[in-house]
Image (cartoon, helix red, strand yellow):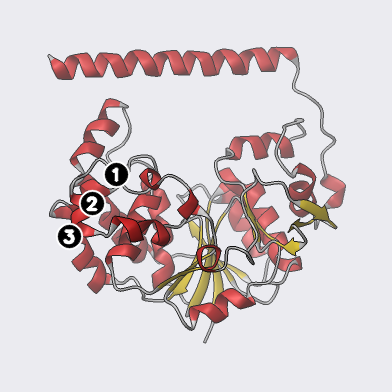
Amino acid sequence: MTNGIYILGNDVVFDQLVALLNSLEVNGAQDIPVCIIPYNDNLQKLRVEIASRSNVTLFENTDSINFWEDFATQAWTSHEKAQKVWQAKGWRQVHCLERHRKLCCFDGHFDKFVYFDADTLLMGTLDYIYQKIDEFEWVANDFQYKSDLNYVFDLSSQKLAEIFQLDELKSLIFCNGWFASKKGILNRNNAAELLKKLTSGEAEILSLRGADQPLFNYLVARSDISFYNFAYDQPALITGNHWSSQFDVIDYVLYDQGRRLTYLHYMSISAAKFTRLCAGEDVEIPYREVFLHYRYLNSPEKLPKLVPPNLFVRWQRNLKNWGIQKINNVLFKWRVLIKND
């Protein structure tokens, strides 16, 4: 049985991907094969990096990519509220459609796998995760259940209580930026059954405060998939993983009250900040030295000397952000007025 790791990425998150791959090599996953699922066709730098690593491959099953993108498209286009809100904002028919490509994990070569978003660093062994997959079909290790359930499901939907036991639902939610499962747990047969439910009205329970995460959580909670979350079932023994927590750093490894983290997730920090950091800009990012250590682990001579952006760059950036926000506000009001007329 083959254990593996999947990552979703492209050249936009190149610096984060390199840091993640290096952290895998030195923090306990050096013998685990890695497959990168392409976010889109922007892969020039990534293909060169993959060619330099013997245990890293690119997922190239276009049939799988097309199937799961079509699945996500049908699911979200049946969500009437989502279509109205996204259209008013000028967004595409399916917001962040490419993020749903991580569903391709279930069509890959690995019998058991751990999925990583690119904005993650491995800190410790994955052995206990793969062992738990022998008992459960879906394994998580995060504290999403402590957050607002409305980030995942729309609590204003009356249908939500008809589908799920709300007092139990919170224990089942997870962050889909990091999870573990098995090949074929989601497949074309059970996906068809779940899609029937979604397109028959159940899509309305999906929250609009996320992109792919609401759909992933629905698929797990609505199916017969057995689910286990280390952070929920063993909260006193499990470390945090989010960058906003206060961790101790020892030899570029993070510890939570003496316990070594399994992974650090830079969720919600833009890829642009990491790109500017690696270009030499003095960007404030939590555990910045840790990230830079892994990013340039194999090329320390390229470690940038950080300097603040000059006044003109800061002024341009602030003006651009102000202008974009102003334009978006005007366009949103304009679309609402036209729609009401």
Tell me which numbered mark, 3 or 2, is placed earlier along the sequence.
2
Q: Position of residue 205 (x, y in %)?
A: 25, 48
Q: Which mark is residue 90?
A: none
Q: Residue at x 62, y 14 (%)?
A: 316
Nearer the observer, disc 3 or disc 1?
1
Q: Nearer the viewer, residue 21 or 82?
A: 82
Q: Which mark is residue 160?
A: 2
Tell me which numbered mark, 1 or 2, is placed earlier along the sequence.
1
Q: Residue at x 61, y 47 (%)?
A: 266
Task: Name the image quarter holding residue 170.
Answer: bottom left
Q: Are marks 3 and 1 in contact (CB under 8 Å)?
A: no
Tell me which numbered mark, 3 or 1, is placed earlier along the sequence.
1
Q: Can residue 169 be seen?
A: yes
Horizontal relation, residue 149 to residue 88: left or right: right
Q: CA distance from mark 1 to mark 2?
A: 8 Å
Question: What kind of element bears circle 2?
Answer: helix
Q: How packed is label 1: few (under 14 Cα within 10 Å), some, or many (20 or more)? A: some
Q: Residue at x 80, y 51 (%)?
A: 293
Amino acid under disc 3 = Lys
Residue under label 3, please give it.
197
Q: Are marks 1 and 2 in contact (CB under 8 Å)?
A: yes
Q: Can residue 110 be seen?
A: no
Amino acid under disc 1 = Asp
Q: How packed is label 3: few (under 14 Cα within 10 Å), some, or many (20 or more)? A: some
Q: Which mark is residue 154?
A: 1
Outermost residue toward the bottom in this view: 1
Q: Position of residue 169 (x, y in %)?
A: 34, 58
The correct choice, above or below, for 173 with respect to 312 in the image is below
Q: Residue at x 31, y 58 (%)?
A: 218
Question: What kind of element bears circle 3?
Answer: helix
Amino acid under disc 2 = Leu
Q: CA distance from mark 3 to mark 1?
A: 16 Å
